[in-house]
Amino acid sequence: MKDHANDQPSKLSKTITITPSVHADLVALGKRFRQQHDRYVTASEAIRILITAYQAAN
């Protein structure tokens, strides 16, 4: 088994560029997921994170 205590941190950031139409699709998808049953919470959170990251990059 690997000893994780000696692992060096790695950079996990990356620039993502999306078009305004893709942004609009992500927003609409996020809204739709929020209206669905709880089993979609994880997907909704993923969309929210993508939207937040996109907005922060602008």
Image (cartoon, rainbow, N blue to C red):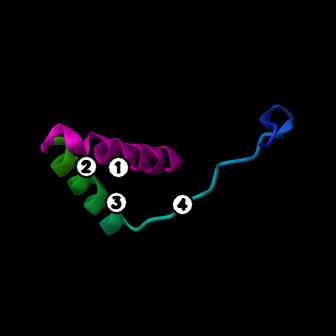
For mark 3, give the secondary structure.
helix
According to the picture, the residue beneath numbered tag 4 turns out to be 16
Instruction: Please provide percent x and percent y for residue 40.
Output: 23, 45
Say which amino acid is labelled 1.
Ile
First in sequence: mark 3 vs mark 4: 4
Instruction: Please provide percent x and percent y for residue 27.
Output: 27, 53
Q: Residue at x 49, y 43 (%)?
A: 56
For mark 4, give the secondary structure.
loop
**Is-magenta flag for residue 51?**
yes
Whole-Å distance between the Cαs marked 4 and 2? Answer: 18 Å
- Depth check, mark 4 against mark 2: the one in front is 2
Q: Is residue 11 above or below residue 20?
A: above
For mark 1, give the secondary structure.
helix
Does the residue at mark 2 contact the one at mark 1 (Cβ under 8 Å)? yes
Asked whether 9 or 7 is in front, the reply is 7
Horizontally, residue 55 falls left or right of residue 48, namely: right
For residue 30, the mark is: 2
Asked whether 10 or 21 is in front, the reply is 10
First in sequence: mark 4 vs mark 1: 4
Horizontally, residue 2 falls left or right of residue 19, namely: right
According to the picture, the residue beneath numbered tag 3 turns out to be 23
First in sequence: mark 3 vs mark 1: 3
Horizontally, residue 13 falls left or right of residue 40, namely: right
Say which amino acid is labelled 3.
His
Q: Residue at x 22, y 42 (%)?
A: 39
Q: Is residue 30 above or below residue 16?
A: above
For mark 2, give the secondary structure.
helix
Say which amino acid is labelled 2.
Gly
Sort mark 1 into few (<14), some (14-19) or many (20+) by Cα contacts within 10 Å.
many
Q: Which residues, given as a range, are shown in magenta?
A: 35-58
For residue 47, the mark is: 1
Whole-Å distance between the Cαs marked 3 and 4? Answer: 11 Å
